[in-house]
Amino acid sequence: MRKVMPVVESSGLSHVGPVREDNQDSIHLSNGLCDSETSRLFVVADGMGGYSHGDIASSLAIQKLVEGLDNGKTKMSPRSFQRGVDRANLSVYKKAQQLGAGRMGTTLTAAIISGEDLHLIHVGDCRAYLVRDRRSICLTSDHTAVGDLVRAKLIPPGKVRTHAQRSILTRAIGTGLFVRPDISRLRLQHDDHLILCSDGVWSVIQDDEFADIVENSLAIDQVSKNLVNLAIQRETDDNVSVVAVHIRELRPATGVSQDWVKESWFFSRKKR
């Protein structure tokens, strides 16, 4: 079986947004996973605003997921991904008890690019979009009450963004002792773009507009900036976070150098 090195560019941007006082989102971009030159990890997490310490929940969940996956022994398998989520979930649950905070929780969507495969780990209502051939496709299902209504075909997908119960989560990290993530795999292609974003972004940006933003952005850092700026211009009522990844090339993994990785990210926790 051939080994493939993904030549990627990535950028991330997290902003408090126009309404909230604090940013409870967290993001993560990594150069490598398990010291591998062919694997990359990207994560967006959104702390639950109705619970205590959402910012701690989102950052802790990412930290423990990364530790669980980057322990030098991890293989790319659903079982290892579940263990990583279990580690993150239990850590947030215990932290709430230590702080006497009642309940803490966060959503979490992680993308692992391993060779030419994209692995997704998803809990909650952040989203992952694939932009390919000028079309954008949502790769995740919202773990919300409204998402359940869509899957039951009781309301059309187009009603999700304006539904009064859009933010009622049915799954989250840290709110219970156990959580079941959605785990999926997709084969990547040359020139694919991947976008991870919190619901403060996709709630005011239509699915097909993600492809438009990618098409009209000259560089990968502009993709994340343009999406965040558009969400703010449209007066989103939540924090806004984006991680954007461009698969520039899929090449045989021989004589790999680190020079091809370009990453940038900016984080705004509080209003100034």
Image: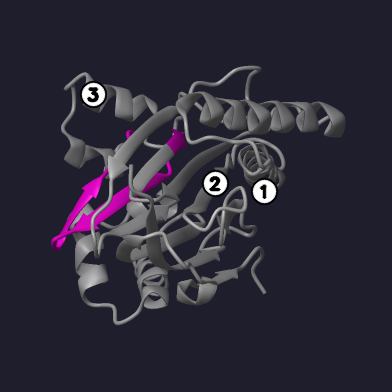
* Residue type marked 1: Ser
Q: Position of residue 71 (x, y in %)?
A: 68, 40
Start and end of the magenta stretch?
121-142
Q: Earlier in the sequence, mark 3 or mark 1?
A: 1
* Label drawn at residue 59: 1
The reply to whether residue 72 is in sight is yes
Q: Earlier in the sequence, mark 2 or mark 1?
A: 2
The alpha-carbon separation of the residues under discs 3 and 2 comes to: 23 Å
User: Which residue lies under the disc numbered 2?
Assistant: 45
Residue name at image x 65 percent, y 33 percent: 88
Residue 124 within the segment the image draws in magenta: yes
Q: Position of residue 108 (x, y in %)?
A: 52, 40
Residue name at image x 16 percent, y 22 percent: 153
Residue name at image x 79 percent, y 33 percent: 95
Relative horizontal placement of residue 124, taking residue 188 as reference (left or right): right
* Residue type marked 2: Ala
